[in-house]
Amino acid sequence: MTTETSKIKIAILSGKGGTGKTLLSVNLASVAPSAHYIDCDIEEPNGHLFFKPENLTEEVVTVKIPQVNPALCNACRQCVEFCRFNALAFIMDRPIVFEEVCHSCGGCSLVCPINAIDEKDKGIGLIQKGQSEQVSVYTGILNIGEATGIPIIKRLLAMEQEEPSPLTIIDSPPGSACNVMESIEDADYCILVAEPTLFGAHNLSMVYDLVTLFKKPFGVVLNKCLEEENPAEKFCEEKKIKILYRIPFDQELGLLNSNAEIAVRKSEKYRALFASLLDIVIQEINHETSSHS
Amino acid sequence: MKIAIPMNEKTLNSSVSAHFGRAPYFLIYDTETKESVFIDNSASASRGGAGIKAAQVILDQQANALITPRLGDNAADVLEAAKIEIYKSVEGSAEDNIDALLNKKLSILSEIHPGLHDHRNK
Ligand code: SF4
Ligand code: SF4
C-alpha cells in the first residue's frame, strides 16, 4: 500500500494553546504533496495567518433557535422547565429565549403541547475556504459569545469530505472539552503535542485521557526539547505512550513561527524535519491499520 | 415589597453571598409582614445558564428588589424585563443591607459582568 494515495486524517491536539499545535499542523500539511488543513480551533483560529489562503469563499453556519408565538402560547411553562441549558426564562407570563445560551437541541418546540414554538435560523459563525499552494485551507470562526461551536466543526468536517484529499490535518481546539471530541471523531490518528515542562505533562495527561476514552490510535510529539529532564517524556514512559518525534528547541524555528511563516516553505532543513515526522506518523498509521484488521 | 438576597447561610445576620447564580440560598424578605424565608437556589448546581435560572427563582418568588454584589448580563436581562430593581450590596449582614435599602442608602448596581460562555479549558 502506498501511503500517498490512501486517505488519511490526522488530528493534532494539545491540552492548551501555544504548545506548538498550530506549528505542527501547518508544517505537516505543507510538507505533503497535497493536503487539507482544517482549523477546528474555532475560538481562535490562527492557521490562516500562516497560510494566507487565496480565492477565499465564505459560508455562514446557522443553528435553529426557538421562537415563541405569543398569540398561541398559553403560559404552561413546560418549555422553560424542560430546557436543561436554562436558555428559557419565564417573564411576565411568556417564555423568553436567551439565544446565546441556547444549544439548539430542539427540545422545547417538541415539548410544547400546543406547538407555539417555531424555529428560526441564526448565524453563529463562518467557514472560510481558500488555497495556499498545494494546501486547501478550511477555517472555522465562531462568533464571540456563542454557546457552542460544535455545529461549525461538524460542518467543517462535512465540507472537507466533499473533495477528499490524500492527507487531512485537523488542528483541534485546545483542551479536552466536547468540541475537541467532535474534531477527532473521524480522525484515523491523533498526535498529541506537549512541551517539556510539568504543565506540559499535566496538559498532556488531559488529552491522553480523551484519546484513550475514544480508543483512537495516537502518539506524542515533544516540542521544544532540551537536554534536560522532560516531565512530558516521563509521563509517556510511564504510560507506555509512543513518542513519535522530539522537535528540538530551536530559536530559528521559533522565530519563523512567531513571524507566521511556514518553516517548511522557508528552509530545506525544516522541510526534511517535518517530512521525516510525517513519514513516521504514516508508518504508524499503516502499522495500526494492518495490526487491527 | 419583597427583597431577595443571595446567601451562603440561612441566617439574617450572615453576610451576602459573593455569587448570585451560584449562591446556595436566597433570602426573601417581606417588608410588610417582616417575614424572612430562605429558599434553595435550584440553579446553584446547573452547568450552564445558572444566572438565568437563579433570576427565574427570584422572579417566581415575586420579589420586587434584589440586593447583590455582582450580577451577570443574562440574569440582569431577566430581572430588568421583569422590572425587578437591582441594588449593590454593602459590607455587613443581610439584615444591615435590608436596613440600608429601606433607608435608601443602597445604590443601583451599575456594573454588569458578561456571562461566562467560555467552554474552553485554558
Ligand atoms: S432549543 Fe433546546 S437549548 Fe434551546 S431553548 Fe429550546 S430546549 Fe433550550
Ligand atoms: S410550552 Fe408552549 S405553551 Fe407552554 S409556555 Fe412554552 S411556548 Fe407557551
Image (cartoon, coloured by chain):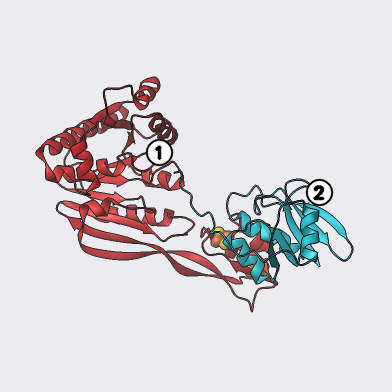
Q: Is residue A288 above or below residue B78?
A: above
Amino acid at the residue labelled 2: Asn
**Nearer to the camera, A268 or B69:** B69
* Chain A: colour as depicted: red
Q: Which mark is residue B13?
A: 2
Q: Do the residues indicated by labels 1 and 2 lie within the same chain of the protein?
A: no
Beta carbon of the mark 2 residue lies under 8 A of ligand 1: no
Q: Is residue A257 above or below residue A73?
A: above
Amino acid at the residue labelled 1: Gly
Q: Are marks 1 and 2 in contact (CB under 8 Å)?
A: no
Element type at mark 2: loop
How many residues crowd mark 2 within 10 Å: few (<14), some (14–19), many (20+)? few
Report whether A83 appears left or right of B91.
Answer: left
Q: Numbered disc 2: what chain?
A: B
Quick check: can you spot residue A136?
A: yes
Toward which corner of the image does residue A92 lie, by quadrant?
bottom right
